[in-house]
Image (spheres, grey):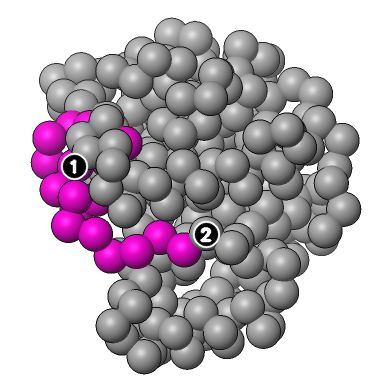
Amino acid sequence: MDMPEPQKGPRIIAVANQKGGVGKTTTCINLATALAAVKQRVLIIDLDPQGNASTGLGVARKNRRLDTYRMIIGGVSLSDVVQKSTVPGLDIVPAGMDLSGAELELVNLDNREHQLKAAIGDGAQAYDYVLIDCPPALGLLTLNALVAAQAILVPLQCEFFALEGLSHLLKTVERVRTVFNPDLEIQGIVLTMYDRRNKLSDQVAADVREYFGDKVYKTVIPRNVRVSEAPSHGRPVLMYDMKCAGSQAYLHLAGEVLRREGHVSV
């Protein structure tokens, strides 16, 4: 794969898959933590009304009054809704309960697909990477993320229907490219919840790699108890158990992402 020129200004990546339970939020949190660990300035925008990224980074619900909803619908600036996380170099715009109503409110707005992009504006200049944790649906919130982003990273669970769901998502990406955001690209596809004891995991991984080639990261995220436990402690697994297999996998994934972004020395 040809190495791109290093990105100038913030790189905005939507972490998206319309299917729930694929490790999307876990990937967003731990990739962001790994990027911050190598001195990248990182912001997570929690665009999922469930607010799992906010919970996973220890943001209490009482501290989410200034949230993604108020940035998109309420006209509050990005700098006013950003919070520091417990991870050095990693900030977050949390998601509160009101975000669940944003889909309906966006329908009646002019330029409804561009609200997130406009809200981010120049405020993202303080960061090297902005990761948008999308909801598990292809609605207006996810569409806003794809319009605002320069690239999409797709977590893909090693299960039977994985390719079918991925093809649906990629058709949406093509429509977004055609109508709203011609520069949107696939940063990569990461295989998650891989179980080496399960022959189906091997078969799905082989099928995805055959179909998508080098768009699929070499790093595979294994099923790992420590990864599952970490969110209940409000910490990324990299801070919960640095030495576990899940943490090491996310560190390797961050290295791949940075190399694809032109940081060839990483």
Give the structural element (helix, strand or loop) at label 2.
strand
* Dot 2 amino acid type: Thr
Q: Is residue 227 magenta?
A: yes
- Say which residue label 2 marks: 219
Name the residue nearer the viewer: 247 or 98: 247
Q: Which residue is drawn at 64% across and 58% down?
A: 188
Q: Is residue 166 above or below residue 160?
A: above
Q: Position of residue 139 (x, y in %)?
A: 48, 58
Residue 82 shows in the view: yes
The crowding category of the residue bearing disc 1, from other C-alpha atoms within 10 Å (few below 14, some 14 to 19, many at least 20), is some
Residue 18 shows in the view: no
Tell me where residue 258 sits by quadrant: top right
Name the residue nearer the viewer: 143 or 183: 183
Q: Give the range drawn in magenta.
A: 220-238
Tell me where residue 215 sits by quadrant: bottom right
Give the side of residue 131 with respect to residue 147, left or right.
left
* Dot 1 amino acid type: Ala
- Say which residue label 1 marks: 230
